[in-house]
Amino acid sequence: MKQDIFVDPESGVVEEHYAVVYAPRRQRDRFPDSCVELHATAEEALAAADPQARRYAARVMGPSRSSEGVRLYYLVHWMGE
């Protein structure tokens, strides 16, 4: 998990989620919300992943706001590897 994200368990704003992330290059550790599709379970995320289309299952933290006001999700780890 990215070390500069602080989670307040009482607010429920930033949480860990299962997701499918569109990632042309998997070197990045944060993604705008337009590239993230949230899923309820790990199994759903793995089933929806499509590596040929560069859509990978992952656990992410978010959403968090950038200084520019963009909603971001931070990579916890890639799943299915």
Image (cartoon, rainbow, N blue to C red):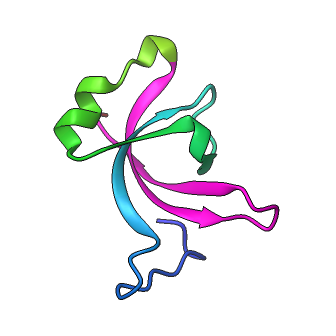
Query: Picture coordinates of residue 23 (x, y %)?
Result: 57, 31
What is the quadrant of residue 64 in the picture? bottom right
Query: Picture coordinates of residue 63 (x, y %)?
Result: 53, 61
> In the displayed structure, does residue 41 sit left or right of residue 74?
left
Quick check: is 7 in the magenta stretch? Answer: no
What is the quadrant of residue 37 in the picture? top left
Query: Picture coordinates of residue 51 (x, y %)?
Result: 42, 18
Query: Picture coordinates of residue 9 (x, y %)?
Result: 35, 84
Residue 20 lies, with reference to residue 8, above or below; the image says above
What is the quadrant of residue 12 in the picture? bottom left
Could you say which is closer to the camera, residue 81 or residue 49? 49
Quarter in which the C terminus is drawn: top left
Residue at image coords 60%, 38%: 34
Residue 10 lies, with reference to residue 53, above or below; the image says below
Residue at image coords 46%, 73%: 13
Residue at image coords 49%, 14%: 53
Q: Residue furthest right?
A: 68
Could you say which is closer to the camera, residue 3 or residue 46? 46
Question: Range of the magenta residues?
Answer: 54-80
Residue 8 lies, with reference to residue 2, above or below; the image says below
Magenta-colored segment: predominant secondary structure: strand
Residue at image coords 61%, 46%: 31
Quick check: is 58 in the magenta stretch? Answer: yes
Could you say which is closer to the camera, residue 28 or residue 43? 43
